[in-house]
Image (cartoon, rainbow, N blue to C red):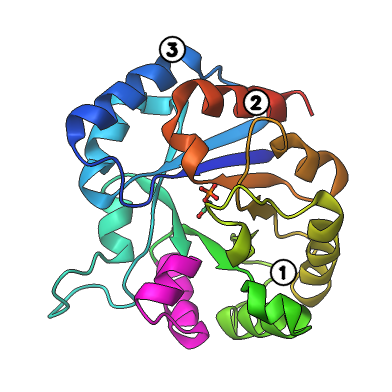
Amino acid sequence: MNYVIGNWKCNPAIARDAKKILVGYKKGIKKSKKVTVGICPPAHLLGLVRAMLKSLAVLGGQDCHWENGGAFTGAVSAIQLADMGCEYVIIGHSERRKYFNETNEGVNKKVKAALAAGLTPIVCVGETREERIDGKLIEVIEAQVKDGLRDIDTNAAKLLIAYEPVWAIGTGQACSPQEAAVVSRFIGNISSDRIPLLYGGSVSTDNGASYLKEAGYSGLLVGGVSLKPADFSQLIANCAIL
Ligand code: PGA
């Protein structure tokens, strides 16, 4: 099974624009047994996306708290996401690590909470440009994977790992499939070959399928293109023929 998961981040600004995007999705996305299509909208749009797309896409949250409730103003728990119809949750996205001080230890707690709530975590890892230049790529990925998945049975737990080099996100400078293949092999070695890997970072209709064909990935985590229904549908179609 291949995955094409859209991460809307903190977009669009208003629900009316979300409806327009979803109308475009409904026109363009063809259901395929080969591709699981997922949408991770901002939490307040989960109900709208579910109501409009129904079985066309599975739903995911963009983050969850590690506690199941209580005095955590502003937080959404894994159980609450599951209750809203989510099957997936992105954890440890580089924007959470950068702007919300998310650590590998915090990621680990969230992954455990998500699994306990029956969600499939999409655990994001990736190096910054400086880390890559300094030759720390493997060290950084190893810590993010090992510490993020500490005490989790990677041979049994249902989870996905997304390799998203920070320098490739939203920059138009995607990681080449050759470079991405080095990381997919490494992640497979230190976690488990049975965990599906997604590539993310400036995925486009032109480059998307190459990560699946040439670099050992089972899917894509898609930011900007997921807000453009025609392109997103094309990307899904490209991955459905593999
Ligand atoms: P991008 O974002 O596709 O816009 O680069 C990917 C992501 O942040 O998940």
Image coordinates for residue 78, horizontal then vertical, percent: 33, 64
Dominant SS in magenta: helix
Report the side of 221 relative to 211 (left or right): left
Residue appearing at x 67%, y 52% in the figure: 199
Query: Can you identify the residue that label 2 sits on?
Result: 33
Residue appearing at x 34%, y 76% in the figure: 100
Query: Can you identify the residue that label 1 sits on?
Result: 155
Residue appearing at x 12%, y 80% in the figure: 71
At label 1, the amino acid type is Asn
Q: Nearer the viewer, residue 2 or 182?
A: 182
Q: Which residues are magenta?
A: 92-116
Q: Secondary structure at mark 3?
A: helix
Whether 103 is among the magenta residues is: yes
Q: Would you identify the image quadrant in which residue 68 lies?
A: bottom left
Mark 1 burial class by Cα count in 10 Å: few <14, some 14-19, many 20+: few
Image coordinates for residue 179, horizontal then vertical, percent: 83, 60
**Residue 12 seen by the camera:** yes
Nearest to N terminus: mark 3 or mark 1: 3
Say which of marks 3 and 2 sits in front: 3
Residue 27: mark in rendering = 3
Quadrant showing the C terminus: top right
Image coordinates for residue 200, horizontal then vertical, percent: 61, 52
Mark 3 burial class by Cα count in 10 Å: few <14, some 14-19, many 20+: few
Quadrant showing the N terminus: top right
Ligand 1 neighbours mark 2 (CB distance < 8 Å): no
129 lies above or below 7: below
Q: Nearer the viewer, residue 45 or 130?
A: 130
Q: Nearer the viewer, residue 207 or 103?
A: 207
Mark 3–mark 2 distance (CA, rounded to whole Å): 18 Å
Tell whether label 2 touches label 3 (CB within 8 Å).
no
